[in-house]
Amino acid sequence: MYQILEAKELAANIYLMEVEAARIAKSCLPGQFVIVRVGKDGERIPLTICDYDAKKGTITIVFQVVGASTYYMKNLKAGDAFHDVAGPLGRPSDLTGESAEELKKKRILFVAGGVGSAPVYPQVKYLHERGVMADVIVGAKTKDLLILEEEMKAVAGNLYITTDDGSYGRSGMVTKTIQDLVTREGKTYDVCIAIGPMIMMKFVCKMTEELHIPTVVSLNPIMVDGTGMCGACRVTVGGQVKFACVDGPEFDGHLVNFDEAMKRQLIYKTEEGRAYLAAQEGDTHHGGCGVCRE
């Protein structure tokens, strides 16, 4: 059992939990995720690791209530426990494979949309701990839906808040802020890391392609079982079939076929749709563990 040490609501239907998971905390890196189950027969829920403390032996997860399983999760309190937590899973951020000296030479921009602030935060924190200061854009529909602002402010070089309705920070979509920073404020970036809803990442990539900024996206929003067996996160990247949970979750955003992925997610929501996709995609429908496809 994995005890919950802290549980709180960050915004409407968005919750944070700190969980005892010593082995995971000692071995995880930014960009990776875990799979949690509330009960023995519960649904497997993949969630990005938002933070971790190896000395304390804890990990922090953030989730949004979108279905029955996350509805039950939100009712858990400090002292309750998950039946199991599996991880770390997925490939760590590419940034973790570079030395501090190499990272300090780069001008890095992060773009977080909505709950995407949760997987962005550990990467920015990782850089900050190595003396690398990155610019961060955090977007939300309204001020009330903004999460982790103070935490992000503590580790970002420059933090730019934007809300769709203009209720806080800059007004408009995150793409407008990207454009303003580069074309009006003279900023230059060597790489952009964008994490958020699929539609947001699609338009961020359109913008950064126009601005000639290499861009990495995290496709954790489309993961379901986290092992490649369900076929939910099958995506085409640069003309090749990939699976977000075993090949990613990070990919070159300029190579991701977002339109195909979003259309496929709509079809996947029904049992009939899943059967159709399995029949249509044949042997490429499942990703397995990733090893057997090498």
Image (tube, helix red, strand yellow):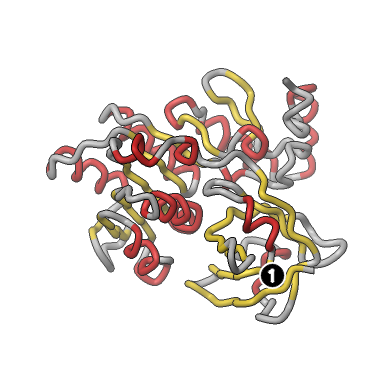
Residue 199, position as x, y percentages in the image: 46, 43
Q: Position of residue 50 (x, y in %)?
A: 53, 58
Q: Tell me the amino acid under the disc marked 1.
A: Met
Position of the C terminus, as image quadrant, is top right
Q: Which image quarter: residue 63?
A: bottom right
From the viewer's side, name the closer residue of 263 and 41.
41
Query: Where 209 sits versus 25, above or below?
Result: above
65 horizontally vs 178: left or right: right
Q: Going 59% across and 36% down the picture, which residue do you hit? A: 248
Say if residue 61 shows up in the picture.
no
Q: Which residue is mark 1?
A: 73
- Residue at 35% x, 34% y is 102
State left or right for residue 57 relative to residue 121.
Answer: right
Is the residue marked by circle 1 packed among few (<14), some (14-19), or many (20+) residues within 10 Å? Answer: some
Q: Residue at x 30, y 36 (%)?
A: 106
Give whichever of 77, 107 is nearer the camera.
Answer: 107
Which quarter shows the N terminus?
bottom right
Q: Could you say which quadrant of the image residue 272 lies in?
A: top right
In the current view of this chain or complex, which residue is farthest to the right?
41
In the picture, residue 211 is in which quadrant? top left
Residue 288 position in % (x across, y down): 78, 32
Q: Position of residue 231 (x, y in %)?
A: 73, 35
Say if 277 sits above or below 52 in the image.
above
Q: Is residue 158 left or right of residue 281?
A: left
Secondary element type, mark 1: helix
